[in-house]
Amino acid sequence: MSYQQLKVWQEGMTLAVMCYQMTKMFPKEEMYGMTSQIRRAGASIPANIAEGYGRESRGDYIRFLQIAQGSLKELETHLILAQRVNLTDPKTVQPVLGQCTTVGKMLRALIRSLQEKGREGVGR
């Protein structure tokens, strides 16, 4: 199986695309500010899922999934801030935040599953 077949990676890619589409509407003076921050955080999520998948150990995979979780929280913060400073409106940002919630739940479930598999071998 490829990382591209992972549902969490696919949903992460959807989230990244949503970030790019949303920030196209931002003012040009934000290109190196909020636009860049949102795009980089959004792209980092599926990138870290993929990188972790390609690692040699379960522990490394979990660590990269946790990094993806951190990027997700960073992204959510940037989205909320963008809304608060009127770079975007609630009807634009809410679907993106909803996708963040979806990806976050999937990341937590995958991490938990991998951690439990790691414990199964202990003492046996």
Image (cartoon, rainbow, N blue to C red):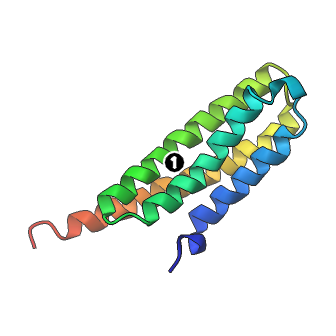
Q: Amino acid at mark 1?
A: Ala
The answer to whether 38 appears left or right of 1 in the picture is right
Compared to 76, does 59 lie above or below?
below
Rate crowding at label 1 as few (under 14), some (14 to 19) or many (20 or more) other CA atoms within 10 Å: many
The answer to whether 59 appears left or right of 35 in the picture is left
Residue identifier under label 1:
68
In percent of the image, x 73 and y 25: which residue is there?
A: 33
In percent of the image, x 76 and y 53: which residue is there?
A: 17
Q: Give whichever of 81, 2 is nearer the camera.
A: 2
Callout 1 secondary element: helix
Q: Give whichever of 98, 51 is nearer the camera.
A: 51
Compared to 12, does 123 lie above or below?
below
**Would you identify the image quadrant in which residue 114 lies?**
bottom left
Residue furthest toward the top?
Answer: 85
Image spot of residue 121 (x, y percent) = 18, 70
Q: Give whichever of 27, 94 is nearer the camera.
A: 27
In percent of the image, x 33 and y 66: which residue is there?
A: 56
Image spot of residue 42 (x, y percent) = 66, 45
Q: How many marks?
A: 1
The answer to whether 97 appears left or right of 119 in the picture is right
Quarter of the image that includes the C terminus: bottom left
Compared to 97, does 81 lie above or below?
above
Image spot of residue 51 (x, y percent) = 48, 59
The answer to whether 9 appears left or right of 99 in the picture is left
In percent of the image, x 59 and y 75: which residue is there?
A: 5
